[in-house]
Amino acid sequence: QVQLVESGGGLVQAGGSLRLSCAASGRSFSNLAMGWFRQAPGKEREFVAAFTWSLSTALSDSVKGRFTISRDNAKNTVYLQMNSLNPEDTAVYYCAARTTITSIYNKLSSYNFWGQGTQVTVGS
């Protein structure tokens, strides 16, 4: 089993920044491909950012140029740096990990472990 614990969410004004963290435990971090998803009220959970198995990064079009995903293998932690936030970024943000050998990084079904989520609220 893999345990994922997110932190760093909160309330921020439009144009502001937040950095989310996700600490993983229970399995070697180097054997995990990590991603971030979000779910706004009344909407489906959607892909935000991820590492591919080759450790390149991928971002959704809606956050490109504003968000960055990174990881610190020594700390077993993945980060989501969010800049230039706007009210449309308001959502619960979920960290996810996949152990499956798939190149599909932007689908919920590719991930077999999920964190509990952290709320991000962007005021206008």
Image (cartoon, rainbow, N blue to C red):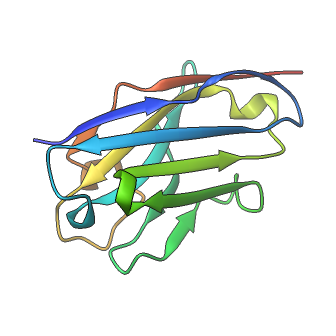
Q: Quadrant of the N terminus?
A: top left
Q: Give percent across and percent down for residue 100.
A: 17, 63
62 on left or right of 41: right
Instruction: Point out the residue furthest to the bottom here.
Output: 54
24 vs 54: above or below: above
Residue nearest the viewer, comparing 23 with 97? 23
Q: Residue at x 84, y 44 (%)?
A: 84
Quarter of the view holding residue 12: top right
Instruction: Point out the residue furthest to the left here.
Output: 1
Q: Give percent across and percent down for residue 14.
A: 88, 30
Q: Give percent across and percent down for residue 52.
A: 39, 71
Q: Residue at x 34, y 67 (%)?
A: 104
73 vs 87: above or below: below
Residue nearest the viewer, comparing 63 with 34? 34
Residue nearest the viewer, comparing 10 with 23? 23
82 vs 110: above or below: above
56 on left or right of 80: left
How many badges with numbers are in the image? 0
34 on left or right of 124: left
Q: Quadrant of the C terminus?
A: top right
Q: Give percent across and percent down for residue 69.
A: 56, 58
Residue nearest the viewer, comparing 74 with 56? 74
Q: Residue at x 26, y 58 (%)?
A: 29
